[in-house]
Each structure stands twice: as structure tokens, then as C-alpha cells.
Amino acid sequence: MSITRRDFLKIAAVTGGVAVAGTPVVKSVLALGKKPVSLPQYVPTTCEMCFWRCGVIAKVVDGKVVKLDGNPIHPNSRGKLCARGHGGIGLLYDPDRLKTPLINTGSRGEGKFKKVSWDEALGYVADKMEKIKEKYGAESIALLTHGTISTYFIHLLQAFGSPNFAFPSFALCRGARDTAFEITFGEAVGNPERVDIQNSKVIVLIGSHLGENAHNSQCQEFAEAVGKGAIVIVVDPRFSTAAGKAKYWLPIKPATDLALLLSWINVIINEGLYDKEYVAKYTVGFNEVANAVREYTPEWAEKETDIPASLIIETARIMGKNKPSVLIHPGRHTAWYSDNVQRQRAVAILTALLGAYGRPGGIYLNPKKKLEPVFLSDKDYPDHQKPEIHKGNYPFAGEEGLTHAIVKTTLTEQPYPIKGWFTTGINIIKAMPNQRDTLKAIQKLELLVAVDMMPYDGVILADVVLPECTYLERHDDLFTVKERAFGISIRQPVVQPMYDTKPGWWIAKELGKRLGLEDHFPWNTFEDFLKMKCETWGIDYSELTKKGYISFPESEKPYISADNEPKFKTPSGKIELYSKELKDKGFDPVPKYTRHEQPPEGWFRLIYGRSPVHTFSRTTNNPSLWELMEENTAWVNAKVAKRKGLKNGEYIVLINQDGVKSNKVRIKITERIRPDCIYLVHGFSSTSKLLRKAYLRGADDQQLITRYDIDPIAGTVGMRVNFVKIAKEV
Ligand SMILES: Nc1nc2c(c(=O)[nH]1)N[C@H]1C(S)=C(S)[C@@H](COP(=O)(O)OP(=O)(O)OC[C@H]3O[C@@H](n4cnc5c(=O)[nH]c(N)nc54)[C@H](O)[C@@H]3O)O[C@H]1N2
Ligand SMILES: Nc1nc2c(c(=O)[nH]1)N[C@H]1C(S)=C(S)[C@@H](COP(=O)(O)OP(=O)(O)OC[C@H]3O[C@@H](n4cnc5c(=O)[nH]c(N)nc54)[C@H](O)[C@@H]3O)O[C@H]1N2
Ligand code: SF4
Ligand SMILES: [Mo]
């Protein structure tokens, strides 16, 4: 790989700068038994500071983790970690960590807890669960969950008799993208996304703010592609870090992206720039698309988007000329407006017209490898007695469930009451919009349990807090990595759990025992389960623990060729430019433009995104990362600031359309944002006094997101529909 340390820094560094490790040499692994005091040990494991799940090599000296580096053989890290990955040490040694189980002795949110033993805490939870089951049925307990811990708690919940769980990663994140790609290509685009950036000649980033979104290997490939002269087109109302690498920055009027996409398709078709052979061989519905986009001319789109027609035509031609090595990045956080799925459908259709699916520089194909599923137990789950509620009435809602469906059912008690919530690895206050509804729903509960590592906003609301140890102190399930080649990555303890904290699998198993569900947890330790799994799959467990990652290079078949023809698992067996499936369910078979409300005079649209040195709210108290960025700022256009007499760095507050007022936040006056928007990095301003660093630092975008739209196709949420005003701090 030709990427230099310097290139990566240039791409990834924005506000705070990103520390990048050199390629480490794995010297010895878990030299158990002999423990020379001064010789460091190097233990491979898998990062959980975000969901990219890079391979990590931890350097341990005298039982302390002193450094984390990227595992050079892991495709997601390639020898490097992002700042947050390095910051794992800050999490491990954060003095504000949860240290023992806690039971709430005050009212919810008051933060008054008594320390209790595991036995008392688990007994209390099991007892309450049984009572709720007796009174309302097992389905009345729901799970809101994110991250590796989900595996064990979904299992526990299903064994208990409830089907109702939801991840924020569907409705609030990548659900719209995955649904649109499944409808179009018969499969989702993967996680990590199967984007062949390193071979792209043109990279189109529509709101994907790579570099601030610090997905490690993708940033590395982006730097490499830029180094090789790829043309970058960034569509973003804000001049993102990626825009700094772009030939074209198209500062689009927010909420109008579908107009731009449809008009690009219009130009590509009208000028015959599409891949005719590919379209004829692999797709259905070309004529319907051609007819549908006829009205979406560049001149029309200019009026909607604020992007000059000439630029729309020029950029479309660049894509056409460089096909098929064009990556229209499918994005990830696609929960923007009410038509998320249709916007992502337009991305998918454009990708197909350029012949870029299964082609170098576009989207590579899944590795060819299947492993037999291995379940946590062979025992069947009991049938649930009542219908599942976690997918709402959205025909394309994913198996990961919809967080808002659980909140709504809890509030309305229709079709039946929800009386218990487990929240595991999710900050319900920061992840989900309309905090008032979340708080109202919580008041209806008879049990709220949080399994977490840190006392973030959602955790302090719980009746019972169960402290999980960090990813550096535990085993978790094996990760199947579908990069260009298929691989397996392991998470194993680097050090023993600190304080009285326990791994998630242990907590679920112990609760299971107390609920009479021990048959569903037939293994003694999780390592026993992992060994059994490896044996079933023919993988050498001991080799995996030493290397951290095992690859199956023969599975790599990234591009379409005569002996690698793609299979599209759509109803027609082809790429569906026109979707009969959508039509049959009452939706537009080809995307149509819908106009969204724009902010009234004097108001700004609230938009949000990532900082390269933080992950959502979960790192805002991390001592190492906090040093790099203590609080967020409100980005305000320079002309607006001048008109209002605002000075850079002074504190302001933001007030939204419903009169909700933010915490004070410093203003960042910049030319890098359109005058009709204000931008915040998501996740700041914790309401938990138990977090000495994060407590009320900066402003919380979620607090201002009191309104949200729902996409009728998949139930994904649109959170960029709130307007704010600026007030001086009072
Ligand atoms: N307004 C707004 N809302 C958003 C977003 C946005 O940009 N703006 N982004 C959306 C997206 S894309 C996503 S994916 C979601 C993210 O939603 P979440 O994943 O809920 O995000 P966090 O705010 O980081 O909260 C994570 C919680 O899990 C805990 N945690 C972290 N690691 C572990 C672990 O290993 N074990 C346990 N037990 N707990 C752990 C943390 O301490 C924290 O309390 O939010 C969505 N919501
Ligand atoms: N450092 C870091 N990296 C992360 C994460 C993290 O927490 N921290 N989280 C990870 C996760 S789970 C996710 S889902 C991804 C999310 O990351 P992405 O999928 O890249 O990004 P989004 O949050 O959709 O987009 C944010 C960008 O959209 C722009 N934007 C706002 N409104 C509009 C609009 O109407 N049109 C257009 N074209 N652009 C608009 C904003 O200005 C901002 O630059 O990041 C991942 N990577
Ligand atoms: S991108 Fe960064 S935080 Fe995410 S898994 Fe990789 S190193 Fe960890
Ligand atoms: Mo996400």
C-alpha cells in the first residue's frame, strides 16, 4: 500500500488532528505463564470504539495497556487506527466508568444510586421481568440495543418470549441505504461498505463526510485515490474535510439531493453516457426510468438545488466519461428526510447506469464464502403470543427493528403495553430524536435496565445499572469481515476486567439462569463457545488468538467477469431500475422528487455530523479524546454572523421551532457553510453529572430535534427537518 502516514493525516485531521500509528511488529502474543516484568506483551483484538471494527494490537506492560496499534493483517485497519481507536486506553482508564451494579434509589434521572452486588441486581431484574410477564406477557419487555452486546440480549429476550428489539443502526442510520440497495440489487452494500475507492477515478460524496466520518480503511483508500488523481465531487451544504480534496464542491440547498440525482440521471441518459451493454445485460426498467426523469432537467434542478445547471451537466459528463470506475458513495447515516429510501434508490440507479456495480472503482462484489450458522444454543425459542411491534407498519422495515416503533408503542400502549426496557450499548437520549417522547415513554415503564460501561444520559435514567467491562477486557462473538476477501476477527481480553464489571455474555447468561433459561446458555465461558464455533468452521482457534484475524484469500472475487457473473436476488433476477415490488406496495417504482419545507426567513436548518476524534456521545467523556476536542461548536456562515454582530468563539444558544433551547455553545464563524444552515457535531452536552468532563459541554443536536419525519417505505427517520434561531447566551 503506497499511502504514507502524511497522506492519512491530511485526510483525517480536521479539528483536533488524528494520531496515526506506524505498522507494529507482533512480537509475542499472550506470553502466559512466564511473565517477565519488563517485557511487553502484544495482544491482538478488535476495536469497539466505533462499528468499523478494526483489528488492534494492544501493547501491555505490567498488566497495563500502554498503547494500541492497528493490526497490519486486518483489512479494516491495515496497520493503523484512527484517533478514537487509540483513545480506547482513555475509555479503559476513565475514572468515571461504572464500577459496580447500581440500583436507583431516587426518581428516574435524579442520579441517586446505591451500590449493590451482582446477585442483588440480577435478582431484582429477574424478579421484575417475571412480574411484567405475568401481568402483561413477555412481549411487554423490549430491548433497545447497539454493538456486540446485542447478540446476547436479543438471545435472552427471545428465549424469554419477546420479539421486540430495535437497533439505532437501522432507522437512524443505514436502514434507508440498505433497503434501497436490497430493492435495486437484491443485497445490501455491506458493512464496511463494499466501495472500491482505491480504484475509483471519480468519487462522488453526497453528504458522506469521509475524513470527519473517520472510517479507517475507507479514509486510507480515499487518501490513496486522491494521491492517484481521482476526481472528487462533494455535495454538501458545508465545506467538509473531503470537500478540501475535491475538484467540485457543490454546496447544495439541504433536502434537495434527490433533485440533483434525478437530473444527473437525466443527463447521463439524454447524452447516452450510460453503460449500454451493462444496462441491457443486467437491468430491467431502463425505459421507465428514462421516461420518469425526462422532467428533471438540469435547468429545473438548478432552481431546486442552487447548483448551476452547467455544473450539473459538467459533473454528469465526468461520471459518464470515467464509467464504470465511478463511486457514488452510498453513504451510511442516511436518516435525513422523509424520502430517504427513494434518495438512496436514485444513488443505486445511477450506480447501475454507470455499470459501476461489480466493476473496479465502483462497488465490489461480496466475497464468495459461506459458513454454516452457529447459534448460541440449539434450543428453540418459545413462540410469542402477541404480534411483534418493533417494525411498525412499514413494509420494508429491516430485521433490526425501529427504535421509534418501540417508543410509540410504549407511549400509546397499542396494540399492547410495553412495560420494561433493556437498553444495552445505546444512549437512548442522544441516539433517538424527540427526547420529550423518550422521557414520557420511560415514565410508563415498570422496569428500565441499562447495561453500559459509562454513566451517559440514558444510563442515569435506569432503575438498575449493570456495568459491562470494556472491549479490552472481554471476549465477544467472532466477527465475520466481508471485505474484498472474507475473514474472521477475534475479540479477546487484553487485560482482566477492572472493578466489579462483567462481560455482556456473562450478564445475559446469569440473568438467563435466574429466569430458568439456563438451557439457552449451554456453554460455561464464552471462550468455550468460540472454540466450538471455530471447530465447526474448521478454523484454528489458537492461530486466531495469536494473529487476531484470519483471511480466506480464495474468497476474493470482487469484479464481474466471464467466470464471475453476478446473481441479483431481486424478484426479476436483475438489477431493478424500476421496482415492481415498490409499485405493488403502493410506492413510486422509480423515484419521484418531493419538495421539503425550507426554513422561514430568519431561521436556519439544523444539520449535524461527526468529529474525527469522537464517536457520537460515547467518547465525549474519554480523557484522551476530550483533550483533542472538549466541546462542539455551532458553525455559522460569516455573512450571517456579521449581520447579527456575532464574534467568533463567543457563546450563543440555539432555539428551535418548538421553543426548545440548547445549552450554550461557542460559535464558529466560517465561510465553509451555506447561510441557511447551522451545523453541530453530534453527541455533545451530556446531562449526566456523573461525567465530569462531558457534563453540559457544548450543545446537543438531539435536544433540538423535536420533530422528525418518517419514511413510509422502511420506517427510517428524517432528522434534518428542524429549524433553529440564534440567541446570545443569557
Ligand atoms: N441527532 C442525531 N442523532 C443520531 C445521529 C446523529 O448524527 N445525530 N446518528 C445516528 C447514528 S448514525 C447512529 S449509528 C446512532 C448511534 O447511537 P448510539 O450507539 O446509541 O450512540 P452513543 O451516543 O455513542 O451511545 C452509545 C452508548 O453505548 C455505550 N457503550 C459503548 N460501548 C459499549 C460497550 O462495549 N458495551 C456496553 N454495554 N455499552 C457500550 C456508551 O457508553 C453509550 O452510553 O445514533 C443515531 N442518532
Ligand atoms: N469520527 C467518527 N466517525 C464516524 C462516526 C462517529 O461517530 N465518529 N460514526 C459512524 C457512523 S455509525 C455513521 S452512520 C457515519 C455517518 O457518516 P456519513 O454517512 O459520512 O455522514 P452523514 O452523517 O450522513 O453526513 C454528514 C454530512 O452531511 C452533510 N449534510 C447535511 N444535510 C445535508 C443535505 O441535505 N444534503 C447533503 N448532500 N449533505 C448534507 C453535513 O454537512 C455533513 O457534512 O459515520 C461513521 N464514522
Ligand atoms: S475506525 Fe477507529 S474507532 Fe472505528 S473501529 Fe477503526 S480504529 Fe476503532
Ligand atoms: Mo450510524
Image (cartoon, rainbow, N blue to C red):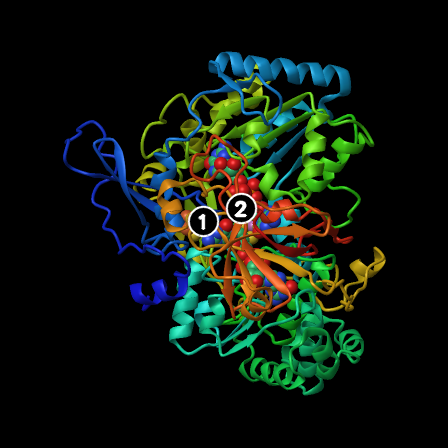
Residue shown at the point (29%, 54%) measured from the top left: 21
Image spot of residue 211 (x, y percent)? 45, 61
Kind of residue indicated by mark 1: His
Image spot of residue 555 (x, y percent)? 46, 56
Quadrant of ligand 2 in image: bottom right
Q: Where, by quadrant of the figure, is residue 350 drawn?
A: bottom right
> Looking at mark 1, is its residue's CB closer than 8 Å to ligand 2?
yes
- The answer for how far apart the CA atoms under marks 2 and 1 are is 9 Å
673 versus 482 height, above or below: below
129 versus 299 height, above or below: above
Q: Where, by quadrant of the figure, is residue 644 drawn?
A: bottom right
Location of mark 2 (residue): 683
Secondary structure at badge 1 equals loop
> Looking at mark 2, is its residue's CB closer than 8 Å to ligand 1?
yes
Q: Give me the disc on residue 437.
A: none
Residue 574 seen in the current view: no
Kind of residue indicated by mark 2: Gly
Residue 538 seen in the current view: yes
Q: Give me the disc on residue 614.
A: 1
Q: Taking 15 as reference, is 248 left or right?
A: right
Pointer 2 with pointer 1, Cβ within 8 A: yes
The local crowd at label 2, few if under 14, some if 14 to 19, many if 20 or more residues have their Cα within 10 Å, is many
